[in-house]
Amino acid sequence: MIKNNYIPQGYKQTELGIIPEEWEVVKLGNLGVTYTGLSGKRKCDFGWGSAKYIPFLNILNNPQIDIDDLEYVNIMPNEVQNAVQNGDLFFNTSSETPEEVGMCSVLTDKIENTYLNSFCFGYRLFDNNGAIGIFLSYYFRSAIGRVLMSILAQGATRYNLAKTTFLESTIALPPIKEQRRIVEALSDVDALIAALDKKIAKKRLIKQGAMQQLLTGKKRLQGFKGDIQRVTLSELGRFVSGNGFPLQYQGDLIGDYPFYKVSDFNTKGNENYLNISNNYITKDIANNLKCNIIPKNSIVFAKIGAAIFLERKKICLTDCCIDNNIMSFIPNENIDALFVCYFLRTVSFGELVETTALPSLGIKALGEIIVNLPSTVEEQRAIAKTLLDMDKEIADLEVRRDKYKLIKSGMMQKLLTGQIRLVKPLAPIIPLETPDAQIREIPLQTHVVAGHIVNALYQSSGWGRTKLQKTLHLVGYHCQLDFGNDYIRNTAGPDDQTMMNHIDSKFKQYRHVRIEVKKENGKTRYNYIPTAMIDELEQVYETYPQTIRHAVDSLINKIKKMDLTCAEIVSTLYAVWNNRIIKGEPISDDLLLEDFYAWSKHKLDFSPDQVLCELNYMRKEEIIPIGWGKYIDKK
């Protein structure tokens, strides 16, 4: 972070901010020209012919064009169209969200008689212009490039990128030598990711082959013999449907039963087993709703709507409830549930849907599915374990690949802004701080958890900057998470503006959260709203240990029910209570009230009964400090 307009040695101030001295601010129109994709073509021209074209998804999904993913188009001998060339860059011109406009891909192969789809435009660099196509592709796919494209996107319900506006835009461009070094570094990580993707694909094919052999009885595991029985699914267990789940009972993260919805099938950690739920209910609520209690080791799947065609079949690890869009299959005692689940994954439920306005599955059709069943439960378990081990191996490879993707994302942010240099600079690099400034190390998880809080609470009562900070204070101290904070006593409670400004800058930089600023009655109010890109943060949050996520989400769920006044009182009470524990001082209701009112004159706005009510609520909900973290003192 730059403070007091300080410019470090080796850097310079530009219209785009502070960049290395060797870098230049250049207009895209000075680097190259744009051209259009195919025009005047009809539907009947596609799918045949001697020419090829680059389809839209090839550009959207790849930083470099995959020349094995081209499609045919008929081009007449005298027809005037723009053929692509090695080194050309391509951008999609339209999307439903500004974050997805202007995704860039570069052609790094020499191919002839190939054209560009009509939903994208090409960008051809001038010779010897000082830019490398693949560097620009990385740049426009990085966080800083995505911000630029989002700014250029115009529209209301659909966003468009104009070529003229694109050419008027400017970027910070390193010297050619540094561009090559950056490309080499990012390409090395891309190669690791591609190698893992290839390995994952191979392992999936091996598993698919094993399923076809083992689940049909064509191949037996060593040590097992006996007949393979052909039985119907209805002979192996029974079907039980889910129940309606009224909105007023949703959102609790603590209860006797997880209440699964179809959306829980997408949750990371629920790949094979349903283990994580966004909703829990008590036994009393289950009785009131007359819920069918689905026993553990039941197989669940979507029974209504488009979700059927996703072909997801999961096993419940605990007794649970399911909503009325889900059906369960409860195996008999002598049947291994995981074996049946793997078998059902070879069956296309989409082919069994009843022909009604809304796709649905019927028990009759499901019950008539023929299962090739080993005669002993031991063989069923052995087959299931073999396949599960394959799944675990694939999952481990996916975790490794996703870590490389996170590393690449961090590298792009540092390398493409000049924060990290891969060539020796003309002058020594000094950290981007004033020489006498005290450096605050604020961990990545601060920004991640803050984004998760915004995503969970932005529609709650009293939402804004103050409630976000109170929630961060409570989550950090109560769940024992190091946010790099250094709170002081301020009017509304514990306050750390340096941390909040850091979070704001990250929200603006990565566009995970939109910050709205409004003036009301002479005061500035901030509102935090998640964007479509918040899923990136949520994916990082999902990598945290389940115990931490459960503790954080449980507390957030309680804060969701608080208005701003309650959140302020609870945050301040927690702070004074925690301070006493840290110092080993006695604790009583009267002493906590005394400390609460000594915090600031503003606290006199709250009556003792109101404060005691929140104190009792904290005890009831077990929001009780243990003396973790720093003592919060006056300014």
Image: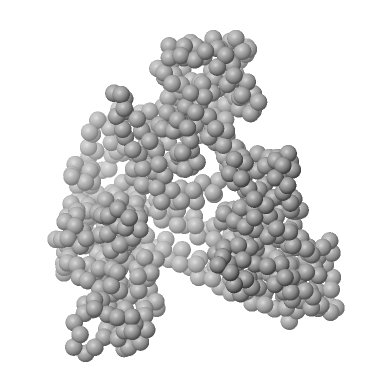
The answer to whether 43 appears left or right of 208 in the picture is left
Quarter of the image where one finds residue 480: top right
Residue toward you, 255 or 31: 255
Considering the image in quadrants, where does the N terminus appear?
top left
Question: What residue appears at the point 41 percent right and 44 percent down from the top-left corner?
Answer: 530
- Is 99 situated left or right of 381 in this image? left
Identity of the residue drawn at 59% across and 19% down: 613
Residue placed most toward the observer, 320 or 422:
320
**In x, y percent, where is residue 179?**
27, 59
617 in relation to 476, above or below: above
Whether residue 148 is visible, yes or no, is: no
The tally of labels here is 0
Relative vertical location of residue 73 with respect to residue 581 in this rendering, above or below? below
Where is residue 544 shown, x and y percent of the image?
55, 46
Where is residue 422 shown, x and y percent of the image? Answer: 31, 53
State the residue at coordinates (48%, 23%).
565
Relative side of 103 to 360, left or right: left
